[in-house]
Image (cartoon, rainbow, N blue to C red):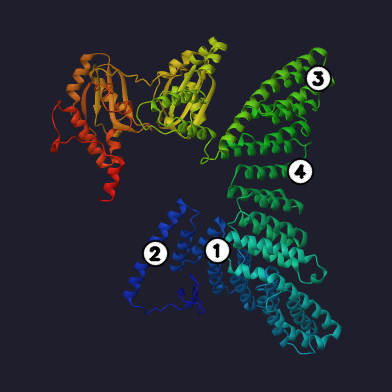
Amino acid sequence: MAIVEDEVRNGSEEENEIEVVVEEDDGDQDSDDSDDDDDDEAAIEKKVADLVLRIADDPYNYNDHIDLIQALWSLSELDRWRSAFDRLQKLSLLRAEHWLLRLQTEETLAHTPQSREHIANLFQQATIDCYSIPILSEWCSWSMTAGEAISAREQLDEVLSRAGADPLSGKIFWDAKLELEKAKLETMNEEHPSYKEQKKRVLWCLEEAVSRPLLRSEEAWPQLQELAVTMYDQEYVDKVKKQHDAALEYLQKISPFEDRLLTTEDAEEKCKVYQEYIDTVKELSHEDKYSECDSRGILKVLYDRATTECLSCEASHGLLLAFVRHVRNTSSRATIHRVLELCARRCPRKATFWILKMQQAEHENKGIDEVKSIFESALSKGMDSYKQAEALWLSYLEQSRRRTDFATQDHVDRLRRTFRLAWDSLAEAWGDEANDSEIPLFWARLEYKRIKDPAQGKEIFEEIFKYGENKTLSKYWEALINLERTRDPPAPERKLRDLHKRALRCVNDYPPAVARLWTDYERDFGQLATGVECAELCEEKLQKWRESYQAMKDKMIGQKKKGKQIPNKKPKVDNKKKKDEKTNKGKRKSDDSSENTEVKRKKDADMEVDVPDEEGDTGGGVKRSHDEDEGGKTENKRQRRDSSTETGGSGREACTLFVSNLEFKVNEQNLRNKLSEYGDIVSMRVRAGVKAFGGSICYCQYKSPESVDKAVEHDRTPLDGRPMFLSRYSATKSKPTFKYAMTTERNKLFVRNLPYSHCTKEALTEIFEKFGKLKDVRVVTFKDGKPKGLAYIDYEEEKPASEALDKTNGLLVGDRKIEVAVSAPPPKQEASTSVSLGLPKRDVAGGMRRTQLSSFIPRVLQTATTSTSTSKSTSNGSSHENGAEKRPLSNTDFRNMLLNK
């Protein structure tokens, strides 16, 4: 037997649809055809192998999985084909068309009760992944031919429970149910014991169809009326007629939403329509006349449809959660299980639905193994944020706590191991985000209150304080103090008082909280001396906190006001300037410029210390002085600071290191670790992304000036592949200086044309140290740390440098011949300070040149100016060309030129 594929199945044009036909092998095939088949099979096997490798590298590439499934089908590898489908199903949701492909294929291969049961399970799994009318229709068609009427009826009931209330397509499935019951009725005669019962089933199908707000439900009314008259009286017919009219009215109110959904393509817009649709159905469900219209079933269908079609929208999570809440209040346990599985499949990286699944399992008194299985499945999906992962762990820990007998040591030890695993796992997966975690707080509370081991709880808090900024957060100290005050046995007063003092010293985010705790404690239990001490220390701490808080608040308000300025709106100063220009019209420009200079100086004096974020990048290769970042302070402010902190300021300045050329998004922890190698750090302030410095900058204050000296010796040490520029901090404004000599140095060699692979100190030392003792090897790099192919080799003496010059100049290193010369930088050209006649001073200093301005001057005026200057340079008594003296052109001359007079 061989499995072959047909490109057309029942005239369907769906992509990827195949029909499986079982054919007998033909033993008389030509050998040529067999050879061709072998070649094709080998090519497909190679394709399968390549796809398997690609999937191993990227298991979440959906298209690669589909290509593999199709290739395996071509090889008639049924088991591998099924395994590929199952693997893809575990990794992600399957699209409706691919579910349909598998279901149709499996149907043709199902010939045993076990295989038919397997197909029924596949249909249930498919409807969990998506709400698809083609899949439901296929399920309906398969159930009609799957076997006995009882099993067919069960399968149709499953379909109706999912889509029977769909206003748009539900009528299709009720018609199928009606046909099944009619076919069963036709096989009986009136004497059959089940004839009347079967007739009632047919009537029930018709009644359900006409009592629901379904499209084309009126088509079933004549059949119901005809059958009902033979079985019941007119009162029954009138009752159903009333329900039918209410259903038609209900349908009329919701039809506009179905029309909008059919014409809307955008997922976000469609999601809004669904939300309006759902709200409308909820309102209609409260009206008595629509009580038989199955609003609850319609809501289930709408939630299912909405979360399938709008799964990519942000609102889909809220819709899924509303779906769960709806079925919890209205549906059976089996439906709740199905909907929870549906939500977890469609939104696997949110903890919400996994938590609900664990809670449902606990509610049904399932064992810890089943809860653990759900939890492990959730962990394998990977939560999309730390908060989601923490919520998942907390829910599992809560269930573990509820199952723990605290009188049994084994249970307690198991709970402790679970808490430790949770805390460590989050730290490993999320890094610093896990520093501020609720899990150790939960654990510590249990140690104090349930396990009655305060020493263990105190150790947990001490471990909490080691991570991140936890030691400065008031919430941890408040929790510790409250637990210590209520512990059993009670803590000594001295230890409690010391704990309050320590908390007050450490807390920075909100000291009033711990201050209030200590104050209350002293009021309740303290003596006069301890109460006075508490009041003094609390007041001192709160005063510092208020000052820093006010400074931060003022800074934020200032930034907010600055951000609200309208760029196009000119300030009042500009209006005043315009008035001054009008009144001073005709005066010499220099008078006004001197006034403007004074104003500019005043503005410069009022500038803040911080470098503006939008300052232009110089792009030069010379290291900028940090003084440019500090140059905006006013002299008065500097004088006040110097007078108040003469000794302290100079000492602090000597202990401060300035670091520049850092990455725009520098890793502050790596920077702190690197700088701490040179000494103990008192404080470190990083300003990220200062364009004027070509990256981030840092001010690092050490305990002693010796640490700064040690750090400067390691200038240009790389951090994350980029050299750091290390220099001493200076509050006085000075020009950038170049720290290397600009004169000829006979003991230093300049090397160029180096291959980049040899632009390291180790590689260059290996080449040049054989000629003599080296003093320093300096590789020239760009700001980002990449080498330029240049280097300086500094020897202790001149003789080895001369020998190295002779031996290495032209030496082949790698694939390049290096060029070596004595270090002799060319002298720097100073700008000329002499003022040329006829040019403004700014031209000499490098401002806008006269040649640049000439493009804006009319050609006639340029000629006139030239001729005038020429006449001044000639000797007295000489005449110009044509014997007449040139004169400046007047307005009349220009008017005549324009009019061609």
Earlier-in-chain disc, 3 versus 1: 1
At x 77%, y 22%, the residue is 518
- Mark 2 or 1: in front is 1
Q: Which residue does the numbered mark 4 point to in the structure image?
A: 402
Residue 777 screen position, x and y as percent: 31, 22
Cα–Cα gap, marks 2 and 4: 55 Å
Three-letter amino acid code of the residue under disc 2: Ile
> 867 above or below 712?
below
Q: Are marks 4 and 1 in contact (CB under 8 Å)?
A: no
Q: Which residue does the numbered mark 3 point to in the structure image?
A: 522
Q: Are marks 2 and 4 in contact (CB under 8 Å)?
A: no
At x 57%, y 40%, the residue is 429
Earlier-in-chain disc, 2 versus 1: 2
Query: In the structure shown, which secondary structural element does the residue marked by tag 4 occupy?
Result: helix
Q: Is residue 659 left or right of residue 348?
A: left
Q: Which mark is residue 44?
A: 2
Pointer 1 local density, CA inside 10 Å: few below 14, some 14–19, many at least 20:
some
Residue extending farthest top: 647
Q: Which mark is residue 95?
A: 1
> 562 above or below 714?
below
Residue 335 screen position, x and y as percent: 72, 62
Three-letter amino acid code of the residue under disc 4: Arg
- Mark 3 or 4: in front is 3
Earlier-in-chain disc, 2 versus 4: 2
Q: Which mark is residue 83?
A: none
Cα–Cα gap, marks 3 and 1: 67 Å
Residue 794 screen position, x and y as percent: 28, 19
Query: In the structure shown, which secondary structural element does the residue marked by tag 1 occupy?
Result: loop
Could you tell me if residue 166 is visible in this image?
no
The part of the image, by quadrant, that contains residue 856 is top left
Pointer 4 local density, CA inside 10 Å: few below 14, some 14–19, many at least 20:
few
